[in-house]
Amino acid sequence: MVTPARPLTPLPRLDERARGIFRRIVETYLTHGEPVGSRHLARLLPMTLSPASVRNVMQDLEETGLLYAPHTSAGRLPTELGLRFFVDAMLELGDVSPEDRQRIERQVEAKDRDQSLENVLAEASSLLSGLTRSAGVVVTSKDDLRLKHVEFVRLAPEQALAVLVAEDGTIENRVLGIPMHLPPSALTEAANYLNQRIRGRTLAEVRQVIEETRAHAQAELDELSARLVESGLVTWAGLQQGQPQLIVSGHANLLDDLATAGDIERIRLLFADLETKKDVIELLSRAETGEGVRIFIGSENKLFSLSGSSMIAAPFRDGQQRIAGVLGVIGPTRLNYARIVPMVDYTAQIVGRLLQKRST
């Protein structure tokens, strides 16, 4: 299922001949990235039309804003509006091949064994990048991380490692300062106190519980252990308040199939776009607002206004069916939408299935 990124702009109805010509131009562009001339197009069409008749239809399509001529006397290419019309009204989605399904399942599930969620998502991003020859992107938030276990390990006389284990298998390590003469029993006591209260709660909920029972904690724990509980929560506060995490894989794939200086400049601009993590995260987060796959084309989003790129993205859900993040690909506007849309959707389903398995 594809959720439109925006309402379809009203366009004149295209008759069968115009739709056939428009489809051929777009499909040729998506495959080769080159403009199509009327003479060549007349040979490709299943209907019998003269090059002059084809030119007249192409002129009509250009006047509606669906096509443009990159150079005088050149063939035609689809505009961003034309691509949007094609994707929303004419795109025929394929299916993920059995080989690609097996590869996605095998590689993502293999990474799931004894790995953190971050590693699983990085593998999913890298896999999508390789399969689509684009940049793979994933954004996820740790704000709703539900805790399972904590322990403290002394590293040095005045340092301890706080190991925080979440229900989804994510492990967070934070180094915190401790008093020089803190006995080992204080580390154990603080961990036991927290483990009685954290399971199934988010870090914010744990902090609230500790705040509400502060007097009880001070009575139950000795002073050093109570200080350790407090300092551990302060150390983890950044985990709760941090920005969503962005993973980008496969920049090099975008360098494939560059034919012109214009292509090189476009990719340079796209690389610059990908460096503005805040804007990429914001765009990916917009894919959380609808069911299924979202497609963003070119200047529909300010992030791609210069590079003329596209993004295909889909949300994935955790064991409670809450949206846990978004994954997808970013590349040129001539992405193979028919192949990539179901591939992104299937990968999101596999990641969601693993998250559900982790929560049981």
Image (tube, helix red, strand yellow):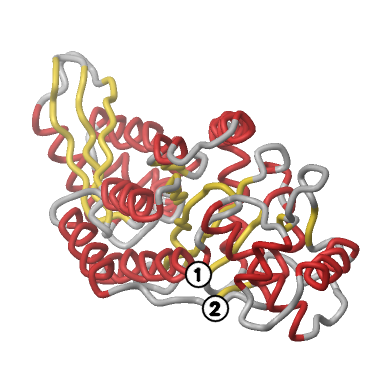
Viewer-closest of 292 and 132: 132
Location of residue 39 (image quadrant) = bottom right
Residue at mark 1 to residue at mark 2: CA–CA distance: 6 Å
> Please, which residue is most extreme toward the left here?
184
Asked if residue 132 lies left or right of residue 170, the reply is right
Q: Where residue 107 appears, x then y in whole percent?
A: 20, 57
- Decide: few, some or many residues near mark 1? Use Cα within 10 Å; few <14, some 14-19, many ≥20: some
Mark 1–mark 2 contact, CB under 8 Å? Answer: yes
Residue 283: horizontal and vertical position, in percent?
62, 50
Dividing the picture into quadrants, the one containing residue 100 is: bottom left
* Lower sequence index among marks 1 and 2: 2
**x, y percent for residue 331:** 53, 47
Q: Quadrant of residue 319?
A: bottom left
Asked if 183 appears above or below 138 in the picture, the reply is above
Where 2 sits versus 184, above or below? Answer: below
Residue 148 vs residue 271, the one in the foreground: 271
Question: Which quadrant holds the C terminus?
Answer: bottom left
**Residue type of the residue flagged with mark 2:** Glu
Question: In this image, 264 relative to 225: left or right?
Answer: right
Instruction: Note whether 4 is above or below 46 in the view shown.
Output: above
Where does label 1 land, which residue?
A: 338
Residue that numbered label 2 is attached to: 92
